Amino acid sequence: MKRTTLSLFAGAAALAAVTGFAAVSAPGDTGAETAEPAARLPVERTSLLCPAPSASDLAETTYTSFTPVTEGAEEKGTATLTAAADGAGAEAGKGGEDAGSGKDGEDAKDGEESKDGKDGKDGKPVLRPGAPGTPVTGTASGADAPALTGTAEGSHAPGWTVQQTTEVAAGTGRGLLGLNCTAPDTEFWFPGASTASGRTDYVHLTNPDDSAAVVDIELYGKDGVLKSTVGEGVTVPPGGGESLLLSTLTDVEQTDVTVHVNVRSGRLGAAVQALDDKTGGDWLTAAADPAGELVVPGIPADATAVRLMLFTPGGSDADLKVRLASPSGAITPAGHETVHVKAGMTTGVDLGEVTRGEAGSLVLTPTSGSVPVVAAVRVVRGEGGEQESAFIPASDPVGARATAAENRAKGTTLSVTAPDRTAKVEVTASAGTEGGTTATKTFTIEGGTTQNVEVPVPAGLKGTYALTVETVSGGPVYAARTLTGEDEDVASFTVQPLPDDRGTVSVPKAEQNLSVLQQPPA
């Protein structure tokens, strides 16, 4: 048998062993007579990474893990969150009285957090998520809470979501900071960062693998690249993390900075923690990949200031139409009908109180030829000394399904946008972390509008719950969840977009053509 034939056959056999599906056919054989549409099957394994939550001793962090019930998923599965092996925090699981019932020296059982202050060290789990359909929480206190690496397999993997929410009572970055822990990747864009006086921004990098990762961090301001050699070839240790202060990567102060994280080897989770002396802080998560058309969903109705930041990584300028999808339809903000983005330079535009008391999402489209752009907004709520800020990056659509964990009976707002065509969505509230039964509602979102929908709340709710959004028809749709603090006198809040949870994968139907094994006559 020829070497090329052996290689092809062996490769197909390996694919079948991993996924259970493979196609073996002769070179040039299109398979037109037997080809069938690819099936959507639940993923069997997934990973999530959470950055170290805070450097404040006053920080109180809650982790909420949730996996929606997925038809066709395996019956059994496992999931764990474990402390990353770095100096960002030496201890985890300091839940005190609210922690689970794990005993000292023992791993926490499913759905529990251990009281042992040493949990998270030596590979011990910080939190073991519960069964699909039921959210589970864990807590950590102070500046010692570490970055986390997590893996889910089997029934726990499809659509696994972990929300990290931190409340900081005072100081720089006070308020509510939240993010959805992210899957590892090799490239990230963060428009909306800053090196200006009064801002303290860190880029957090978390490595899930057992080999070191090497990364370059590039900064772009209003006049282009901010030169620095410090961000080149940063090494992130195996299973560990690093946090770098942006102002140490350059000596140039800039109000609007785009951070580009490019992984040379390995893969990482990345997020920017943006802390402001006057308006608190929040996490800036990675924007959707550069594209000609973008949607920034879920700007709070009571926003007192909105600043749009854009960057185009290519060699061409971009001209974009700016529209606000409101409850009554698309609106063009007065004085900001279009925005010009110079190639390789970060552009910032103040939109003021653009939502004017109504739900809204920004829709950015090219005025002529499409040029890839990344975008995010900084949102401020409140007045005077009671202001707080948060960030919303341009997002991918909900797709088939998306989830936001850690929702409360009060203080949760779900915003859904259909920028083009009318869409129907189904919103499901899970059981509560401590009790309650699921509830579901269906909503129709008219094309060109954004609606703050009346979210279902589990009957008999105790604790917090998860919200899952599914596209039923039409679309595409975009969604974001706003979570506000429990103190009504303070404008603390955080916003998380809801992109597709990638809980299923397209798998071609298996076919076999044994002609590949036949050899031509000698």
Image (cartoon, rainbow, N blue to C red):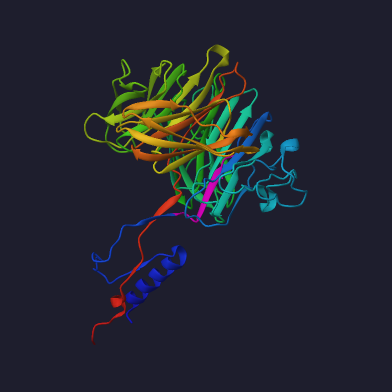
Front-most of residues 248 and 352? 352
- Residue most toward the left? 368
213 to 372, vertically: above or below? below
In the image, is residue 44 part of the stretch drawn in magenta?
yes
Q: Determine if residue 192 is in view.
A: no
Q: Residue at x 37, y 56 (%)?
A: 39
Q: Residue at x 59, y 24 (%)?
A: 485
- Main SS, magenta residues: strand
Q: What is the x, y in percent for residue 90?
A: 69, 43
Front-most of residues 210 and 14? 14
387 to 243, vertically: above or below? above
- Residue most toward the right? 104
Q: Is residue 349 left or right of residue 96?
A: left
Q: What is the x, y in percent for residue 225?
A: 39, 34
Q: Quadrant of residue 347?
A: top left
- Residue most toward the top? 384
Q: Is residue 522 left or right of residue 48?
A: left
Q: Determine if residue 431 is in view.
A: yes
Q: What is the x, y in percent for residue 116?
A: 75, 45
Which image quarter is the N terminus in?
Answer: bottom left
Q: Residue at x 38, y 69 (%)?
A: 12
Q: Quadrant of residue 117?
A: top right
Query: What segment carries the magenta color?
Result: 42-52
Q: Quadrant of residue 286?
A: top left
